Image (spheres, coloured by chain):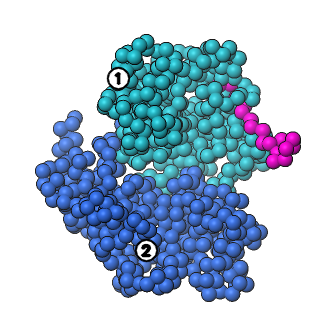
Chain colours: A cyan, B blue
Amino acid sequence: MNPIVSRPPLVSIRDLKIHFPMRSRMLFGKPEGVVQAVDGVSFDIRRGETLGLVGESGCGKTTIGRAILQLNRITEGSITFDGKDLSSAAEPDARRARRRVQLIFQDPYASLNPRMSVGRAIAEPIRLHGLRQGEAAIRERVHELLVLVGLAPSYASRYPHEFSGGQRQRIGIARALACEPELIVCDEPVSALDVSIQAQVVNLLQDLQEKLGLTYLFIAHGLSVIQHISDRVAVMYLGRIAEIGERRDVYGNPRHPYTRSLLSAVPIPNPKLERARRRIVLNGELPSPLNPPKGCRFVTRCPIALERCSREEPPLAPGAHGGSLAACWRSEELDSLLPRPVAA
Amino acid sequence: MTPILSVSDLKVQFGSAENGVRAVDDVSFALERGETLGIVGESGSGKSVTGLSLLRLISKPGRVIGGSILFDGRDLLAMDEKEIRSVRGREISMIFQDPMTSLNPVLTIGRQLTEILEVQGGLTPGQARTRAVELLALVGIPSPERRLGDYPHHFSGGMRQRVMIAIAVACRPKLLIADEPTTALDVTIQAQILDILKSLQKEIGMALILITHDLGIVAGMADRIAVMYGGRIVEEGPTDPVFEDPRMPYTVGLLRSTPRLDRPEERRLRPIRGLPVAPRGEARFCRFAPRCDLVEPVCTREAPQLEAAGAEGQRAACHFAERVPELLHTQEEAAQ
C-alpha cells in the first residue's frame, strides 16, 4: 500500500495538553481559571505527508503548531520528533530539532523585518545554523532559494515593502527553506491572499514538497484548501480532535456531526448545487475554553446530541467498516441522522 | 418596473487624473427591487469603492469624477449633504467586514440601536426601545432585552455582526450594501449570518448588494453577479450562466484557481499568472491583458466594452467573448 505508512512517523503527539492559566487582574490575585487550549490530543505526522489541521478560531490548532515548534510549553503529554522527545531533550538537541521544523505564517509582512533586505533575511538562518561557510557560498545559497520559490535572484537586495502579499509569502517560504527543514508548519499560509495568488502559493508548496521531500502540517480554517492539499485531515473542536483520517474518508464520509456541519457550511461556487444543498446549521457559538462542557465537547451545539453525550466523553474510535477515527457516540448511525456532504 | 438602483458610467478617481488610480472606471449596473447583486473581485478591483460611492462615502483624496447613481428615481450624486444624510441608514444601509470598527465602543448597543430609530425612524424613546428588542430578536440574539445594556466588546464577532445587521435594517431600508459581511467569521457562523440576511431580505423586501471575494457565497445568495477587475465590471449577468458559461477569461481564471469541495479529485489548481496592477490613467487597453492566456495584439491596443455575450442578460468585456469557450477548449487540448 502506501509506502509512507510503513516508516516510523516524523512527529508523534501523545495525550498533549496545553493549558494557559488566566491571571487575575489584581496584583498577587489567584489565577481566575485555566484556558484548556489543547486538552488530550494524540496524532502522528508521517514522513512526506501533508496533514491538514482544520477547525474554527479558538479550537487549539495554532497552539499545537506552536508546541511542535517548541514555542509553547507543554502542560502534559509528549511531542516526539524523529524519535526524540522534545519536552525532555537537552538544549543542544532541542535546538537542532528546531532547525528541522520551520514555520510559515499567515501574514508574511509581519514576520519579515522591514529594515532587513530580503537577501539578509534569508541568509540569517543559514549563518545562524552554519549551513554554508563563507560569504560567497551563502550568497549563492540565497539566490538558489529565491529561484526555488519563483523569485528573481536580483530581488535579494530589495526590502519587504517592495513586494506584494503573494511575493512576501514566497520570501517567507524561502526563509523557512533556508534552514533545510524536514517539517514545515504552515499556519494559515494563504488565508490573507487573493484567490488567484492563493492558488499560485498552494501550487508552489505542492511542488516544493515533491522536490524536497518535505512534510507539512497545514493549519487552516478553510476546508476547501485543506481538502486540496492534504493527504490526511484532523478536525479539531475546542481543544480536542473530533475526527481524523484519510482525506477521502473525512470529506467523503465524515463520521462526526461537527465535520458534517462544517462541510455543509462551506459555500461552493456552483449555483445549482448551492440551491440544492441542505445545511446543518449549528446552534449558538463556541463555548469558552475556560469552562468547556462536560462529556463530549461538541454537545452544546450538536444537532443530534443524546443525554449520554453530556455525561460521557466519546473516545476517538474507528467505525465498524473502517474509515476515519471519530469521537462521537452516534457515528455508526450518522447516515440516518444527518445528510452526507456534497463532496462525495 | 423601474429598477431601484441604476448606476451609469460611474468613475471614482484617487489622486490626479494622469498618475492617480482610477479605482472605479465606467461602472454601470442596475438593481431591481428585492434583487440580490453579488459584486465579486479581488483586492483592489474596485468593489468596495463602488459600494462606498453609492452612499457618497468616498473621502479624499478620492472623488467621484463622473457618472450618475439613480436611486428610486433620484440622483444621489446631485443631492446636497442634508438630503444624502436622510437617505443613509434609512433608505440605503451598509454593513462592513469588521463590526468592531463600525460600532461605537463606548456606547451600549441599545443606545446605538435606538439612536437610529429615533433620528432616522422618528420613533419616541419608548417605541425605539421596544423596536430595538424586536430587532435584536430578529437577528437571533438570545435574551435581547438583557443585552441592550451591553457594550460591543461583550459580544463575539458573529454576535457583533448581528448587531450591525440589526442597526442596518432598523429603518427597513430599500437597499442594503453588505461589504464582505462574513469574511472575518468562522464558517459555521458565516452560514448563520447569510441565513439571517436572506430571511431579512425576504421579510423587508429590500434589495441587497453583496460585495465579496468568495465565489461560493455569491453562488448561493445572488440573483445576478458582477465580476470586477481593475476598476471595471468585466462580466455581468444572471448567476447561473456566469458560473456555468463565463465569457471573460478573468472569470474563468477565478473559478479555476478556487479550490472547491465539489471537485475532490482535482489535485492541481490553475492560478492566474502574474499580479494585478493598480489601474492608472485612462484604460486604452484591456486591464487583464498582461495576465490573460488568450491575449491577442488587439487587447493591448483597445479597451473592450461590456457587451452582450453568452446567455440572455449576460455581458462580458472581452474582444473574444463569443469565442471564449471554444478558445479555452482548443488551448486545453493543446496542453494535453
Could you tell me if residue A274 is visible in this image?
A: no
Q: Which residue is mark 1?
A: A144
Q: Which residue is more in the foreground, B181 or B16?
A: B16
Q: Residue at x 82, y 45 (%)?
A: A24
Which amino acid, mark 1?
Glu
For the N terminus of chain B, the quadrant is bottom left
Residues drawn in magenta: A13-31
Left/right placement of residue B144 relative to residue B315 reads right
- Chain ID of residue with mark 1: A
Image height of A332 relative to B96, above or below: above
- Chain ID of residue with mark 2: B
Image spot of residue B199 (x, y percent):
55, 70
Q: Quadrant of residue B106?
A: bottom right
Q: Secondary structure at mark 1?
A: helix
Q: Which residue is mark 2?
A: B56
Q: Residue at x 55, y 56 (%)?
A: B190
Left/right placement of residue A112 relative to residue A146 reads right
